[in-house]
Image: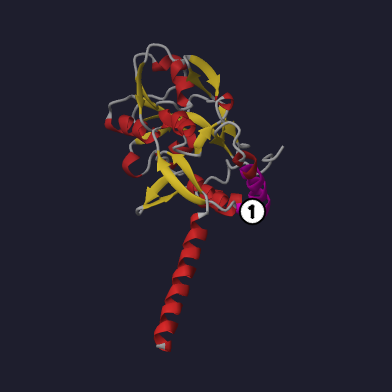
Amino acid sequence: MKKIITFIMTAIMAAVALFSFTACGSDQKTVTIGYTDYAPMNYTENGKLVGFDTELARKTFEDLGYKVRFKLIEWSNKYMELSSGNIDCVWNGFTMNSSDKVNGQDTPRSEIVDFTSPYMYNAQCIIRRANAPEITNVADFAGKSVAFEAGSAAVDFVSSLSGINQKPVTSQMDALKEVNAGTADYAVVDVILAKANAGKGNFSSLAINEGLEMAQELYAVAFKKGSDLTEKVNELFDKYAKDGSMVELATKYGLENVVILDGYVD
């Protein structure tokens, strides 16, 4: 009888311990990160999501005590996803010094969301087929079709061009595919993405247009207005810049020359 009672008590204690562990674990908050397919920032390799932004986001939020979940979004829906609570931030090579249409009006992105301090330099660039003419003047675009990601920083540049056939697509990778397939003459994409893909693998027939200078951009993480996570992430960016982990990760993805290692905290 004693053995039965002992067994029952042991089972009860084990169940209580398991419940306590599960309950404790369930208290950990989860942060959901919105991203698009964009090598070398967020992309899938051997069935696993990798990339500079992916790894930096995981490290940052895990250090803040959060579980991390990634959600693939359409870039043009980023603000809706954020405002609805479907995602907690956009961490995907998000250009902070650009604008988007709000109620038909050009609005600085910094007025729509809260940005962290910038962590990487970028610029738009033009992609062409290697045997296509080099663009040296915006007038050279006349009569051409130009692919670009809807809602991206490329919209500002494409909208300034005259006499072109605009081809908005879902992602920057799709913009490359349009040129690759010959269904667009040119594409306007982030130079970081271009350097990671043009002239390589499936995009070996593509080249970066060097004949037209484009304005410098800054990448930052976007949170809903008033989020208390913005400054917490800034503090960790500052820490990672000082302890070398930021440049170590950037070097892993060939981004050591464009990562920003100062100025994270005002």
Q: Residue furthest front?
A: 1
Magenta span of residues? 233-245
**In this rendering, does residue 146 appear at all?**
yes
Q: Residue at x 59, y 32 (%)?
A: 114
Secondary structure category for the residue under label 1: loop
Q: Residue furthest top?
A: 163
Q: Residue furthest right?
A: 266
Q: Is residue 231 above or below residue 247?
A: above
* Residue 122 percent location from the top left of the image: 54, 34
The answer to if 235 sits in the magenta stretch is: yes
The quadrant holding residue 109 is: top right
Q: Main secondary structure of the magenta part?
A: helix
The quadrant holding residue 120 is: top right
Answer few, some or many: residues within 10 Å of disc 1's Cα (few below 14, many 20 plus, some between 14 and 19). Answer: few
Q: Report whether 24 appears left or right of 135.
A: right
Residue that numbered label 1 is attached to: 244
Placement of the C terminus among the 4 image quadrants: top right
- Badge 1 amino acid: Gly
Q: Residue at x 31, y 42 (%)?
A: 202
The answer to if 155 sits in the magenta stretch is: no
Total numbered labels placed on residues in the image: 1
**In this rendering, does residue 129 appear at all?**
no
Placement of the N terminus among the 4 image quadrants: bottom left
* Residue 49 percent location from the top left of the image: 41, 50
Q: How is the image coloured?
A: secondary structure
Q: Residue at x 38, y 48 (%)?
A: 44
In the foreground, 56 or 147: 56
Q: Residue at x 54, y 51 (%)?
A: 66
